[in-house]
């Protein structure tokens, strides 16, 4: 059996099962930093993914609970794309990735972990970020704690749009 030391995961394992929609509950929490929200607009928000594919993995999320892009109003669709663009710029400033994957998974069979609340993924990529660990070991190693990533991105966003939502 392969083991990696990740003590921060215990909080997730020990937490009570989530009921309801985490993407609806996050903006209502009153503590953007605790829920990893980096930036808000009236139609949605930019949040750091708590279970990232790569360090800096962001999501652009509409405030309204809807599952499909064809349910977005034109204003919501425009706001989400603006959040994606802002996320890309912040990631470039904070982390200097070589490229990005941007997209959405619609439905569980398409890989959506939260299938009922539409969100767009913004995943920074670096040359060589798929190394032997995920290929041979089936394990992804993230080199930075989420709190540190949050702070780096919050600083980058503040330099782009002003102080954050804390």
Image (cartoon, grey):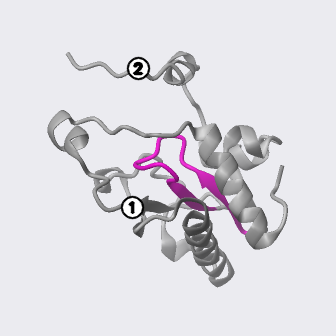
- Residue 150's place in the image compared with 67, above or below, is above
Picture quarter containing residue 126?
bottom left
Q: Earlier in the sequence, mark 1 or mark 2?
A: 2
- Residue 40's place in the image compared with 134, above or below, is below
Does the magenta run of residues contain 152?
no
Q: In the image shown, does 14 or 65 lie closer to the viewer? A: 14
Image coords of residue 40 (percent x, y): 75, 62
- Say what secondary structure mark 2 lies in: loop
> Dot 2, crowdedness within 10 Å: few (<14), some or many (≥20)?
few
Image coords of residue 99 (percent x, y): 40, 70
Answer whether labels 1 and 2 touch (C-beta < 8 Å): no
Q: Residue at x 71, y 55 (%)?
A: 154
Q: Residue at x 15, y 38 (%)?
A: 136
Circle on res. 5: 2
- Residue 10's place in the image compared with 119, above or below, is above
Image coords of residue 7 (percent x, y): 50, 19
- Say what secondary structure mark 1 lies in: strand
| Numbered range of the magenta stretch | 43-61
Q: Residue at x 65, y 47 (%)?
A: 150
> Dot 1, crowdedness within 10 Å: few (<14), some or many (≥20)?
many
CA–CA distance in space, label 1 to label 2: 24 Å
Res 112 seen here: yes
Q: Residue at x 76, y 68 (%)?
A: 159
Res 41 seen here: no
- Residue 138's place in the image compared with 100, above or below, is above
Circle on res. 125: 1
């Amino acid at each position: 059996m392969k083991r990696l030391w990740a003590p921060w995961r215990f909080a997730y394992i020990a937490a009570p099962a989530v009921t309801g929609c985490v993407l609806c509950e996050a903006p209502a929490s009153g503590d953007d930093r605790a829920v990893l929200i980096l930036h808000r607009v009236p139609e949605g928000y930019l949040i750091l993914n708590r279970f990232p594919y790569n360090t800096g993995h962001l999501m652009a999320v509409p405030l309204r609970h809807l599952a499909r892009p064809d349910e977005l109003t034109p204003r919501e669709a425009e706001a989400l794309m603006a959040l994606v663009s802002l996320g890309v710029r912040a990631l470039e400033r904070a982390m200097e990735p070589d490229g990005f994957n941007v997209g959405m998974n619609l439905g569980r069979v398409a890989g959506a972990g939260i299938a009922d609340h539409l969100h767009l993924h913004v995943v920074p990529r670096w040359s060589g970020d798929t190394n032997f660990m995920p290929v041979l070991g089936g394990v992804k190693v993230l080199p930075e704690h989420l709190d540190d990533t949050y702070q780096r991105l919050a600083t980058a966003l503040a330099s782009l749009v002003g102080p954050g939502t804390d």
